[in-house]
Amino acid sequence: MNRRALLLVNRQSRQGQKRLPEVMSCLVQQGFELIAASAENPQDFSDVIRRYQHQVDMVIIGGGDGTLNAAVGTLIETKLPLGILPLGTANDLARTLGIPNSLPEASKVIANGKVRRIDLGRVNDKYFFNVASLGLSVKITQRLTKEVKRRWGIFAYAFTALQVIWESRPFSAEIRIHGKSIKVKTVQIAVGNGRYYGGGMAVAHDATIDDQRLDLYSLEIQHWWEIIFLLPAMRQGRHINARNVRALQGQEIEVYTRKPRPINTDGEITTQTPARFRVIPQALAVFIPRE
């Protein structure tokens, strides 16, 4: 018996429009009965999912982390499991879950894989899979245009980061965790739910997306060039051991700043400080590869 799936592809993603025929072919070969719905942009995905929720067994989304993030609230609401086809630039959630970038292989994961319940992060009223952050990463997001991502692909993150690092200036913040208040001078505060973010950097070397905790790090550097020396360690999440990096873990964290500062969730600027971060354990069912 064919499984019924709602297919949503972000046609504005780096690969979405040109690879849509290939996406549909791969899924049909795996025995899926597809409802392929279109929307003007990923922000409209929620309405589409609600419209078809009683006609399908799952939702398959093709796009990057921002595209997946746009639908997460409705996926929780409808309790439909999620199949992921990595069609974005970074695909950090897919990387965290071990989902291959190959479309035929990713389609097989949805068809033959297993369902795993993963945690979600939440900051104020916004969910996130990977990381929510303020400071340096927001400036990177503001400069990381669609044109830059289309032109440079995964290298766009490193290229843009190098452009803005030298402009970074520390700001004051208060972190509240486990009943304690910590005053910091930092260029970035990042709170991770999953493992990877920003094109393959790890928030912490032992982070997983179902460990029911949030991992915070604060880059408390004095000079912009100090970040350069941290970058190799950030690929493995080992930066949290550096003397100028503060690392904390918890299920609930609050961050306050003197004036509101924008916050980036999964690559999109969505909220601002004051911010309350919390983990939502086992919030969403996702298809992942079998061991």
Image (cartoon, rainbow, N blue to C red):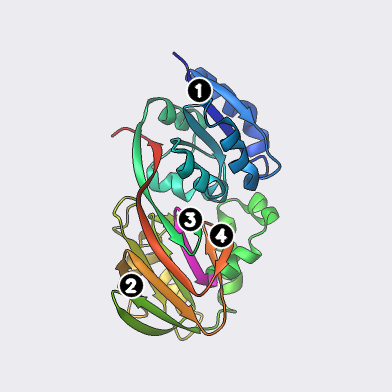
Image height check: is 241 above or below 69?
below
User: Which numbered disc, 1 or 2, marks the residue that appears first in the sequence?
Assistant: 1
Amino acid type, label 3: Tyr
**Residue closer to the observer: 48 or 35:** 48
Q: Is residue 112 left or right of residue 134?
A: left
Foreground disc of the pair 4, 2: 2
Amino acid type, label 2: Ala
Tag 4 secondary structure:
helix
Label 3: which residue? 127
Q: Residues within 10 Å of mark 2 (few under 14, many from 20)?
A: some
Tag 3 secondary structure:
strand
Q: Which mark is residue 4?
A: 1
Q: Is residue 110 left or right of residue 261?
A: left
**Residue closer to the observer: 8 or 235:** 8
Amino acid type, label 1: Arg
Magenta-colored stretch includes residue 135: yes
Spatial CA distance of label 1 from label 3 is 27 Å
Q: Main secondary structure of the magenta part?
A: strand
Q: Residues within 10 Å of mark 1 (few under 14, many from 20)?
A: some
Instruction: Inspect this view and state whether residue 222 appears.
Output: yes
Tag 1 secondary structure:
strand
Q: Residues within 10 Å of mark 3 (few under 14, many from 20)?
A: many
Spatial CA distance of label 4 from label 2 is 23 Å
User: Which numbered disc, 3 or 4, marks the residue that appears first in the sequence?
Assistant: 3
Foreground disc of the pair 1, 2: 1
Spatial CA distance of label 1 from label 2 is 44 Å
Residue at left 55%, top 83%?
A: 169
Label 2: which residue? 247
Residue range highlighted in magenta: 127-136
